[in-house]
Amino acid sequence: MRIRLCLAALSLVGGAGSAALSAPTAAAAACTDINVVSARGTFEPGSLGLIVGDPVYSALQRKLTGKSLSSYAVDYPANLSLTSAARGNSDLVNHVRSQAATCPDQRFILVGYSQGANVVDNSIGISSAGAPVGSPIVATIPTALEPKVAAVLLFGNPIRAIGKSVTGTYQSRTLDICADGDPVCESGGTDTLAHLSYRDDADTAATFAAGKV
C-alpha cells in the first residue's frame, strides 16, 4: 500500500491540463446540519480519501458533536487525464446546488486533497489551470449559495506551487495546509513523502472548521 501511494504522489507532479466535461448531476443526500464534501487526491483510495477525507471526516464527527453530519465523495476520475479535475469541479458544484435546493438549511464543509484541492479551488472561483493536474474553471458555486459554505479545507494544494492561493470571498473560511517540502504544493519541494503526511493535520483542520460552523 505504501509503495502504491508513493507512486501516486510522484505521479501528481507530472501532467496537467484541462478540458470542460460535464459530470452527472449529483444525487441529494440526507438533510443533515452539515454536509462534508470531499474531493480525493489522484489515485487515492478510501471512501472519502484514505489520506485526508476519511480522517478529516472522523475528526469533524468528534468536534461537531452538537451537529448532524453527512458526507459526499466527489464523483470524478481522480487520475491524470486532462479532463479529470474539470469533471470533479462540475460534480462538486452540481452536488452543492442539488443539496441546497433539497435541504435549504444545510451548510457545507469542502475538503480537497492534492488534485481534489484543484477541484475545490475551481468550484470556489480560483482557477487551477497551469497547476499540476489542474484545469480551467468549468463551474462555480452560485453567489447566492456562498454563505452556506462554512469552511474550506485544502491539503497539498497544487496551485500553491505556481504562486497562487485562495483569495476573495472564501479566504477567511479557508485553511490551506502545505507540508514542508511537499513538491505538489511547494515550488522546489523535494520530499515526496511529505505529500502523504496530511492525516496528521486532520484534527487541526477539524478544529478550524468547527470554529466556522
Image (cartoon, rainbow, N blue to C red):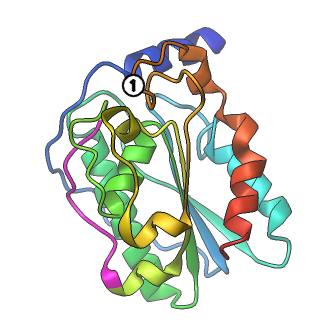
Q: Which residue is mark 1?
A: 187
Left or right placement of residue 198 versus residue 148 in this view: right
Q: Position of residue 59 (x, y in %)?
A: 78, 53
Left or right placement of residue 3 versus residue 183 in this view: right
Left or right placement of residue 4 versus residue 184 in this view: right
Q: Nearer the viewer, residue 57 or 192?
A: 192
Q: Residue at x 68, y 45 (%)?
A: 54
Which SS does the magenta portion mostly show? loop
Image quadrant where one finds the C terminus: bottom right
Looking at the image, the residue that sits furthest to the top is: 3
Q: Where on the picture, by quarter, is residue 77?
A: top left
Image quadrant where one finds the N terminus: top right
Left or right placement of residue 135 versus residue 156 in this view: left
At numbered mark 1, what does the secondary structure look like: helix, strand or loop?
loop
Say above or below: 98 vs 178.
below
Q: So how many labels did they put on this image?
A: 1
In the rendered structure, does residue 137 fall within the stretch colored magenta?
Answer: yes
Say above or below: 45 vs 35.
above
Say what amino acid the circle numbered 1 marks. Ser
Q: Nearer the viewer, residue 95 or 133?
A: 133
What stretch of residues is rendered in magenta? 134-143
Q: Residue at x 53, y 15 (%)?
A: 192
Q: Position of residue 200 (x, y in %)?
A: 75, 36
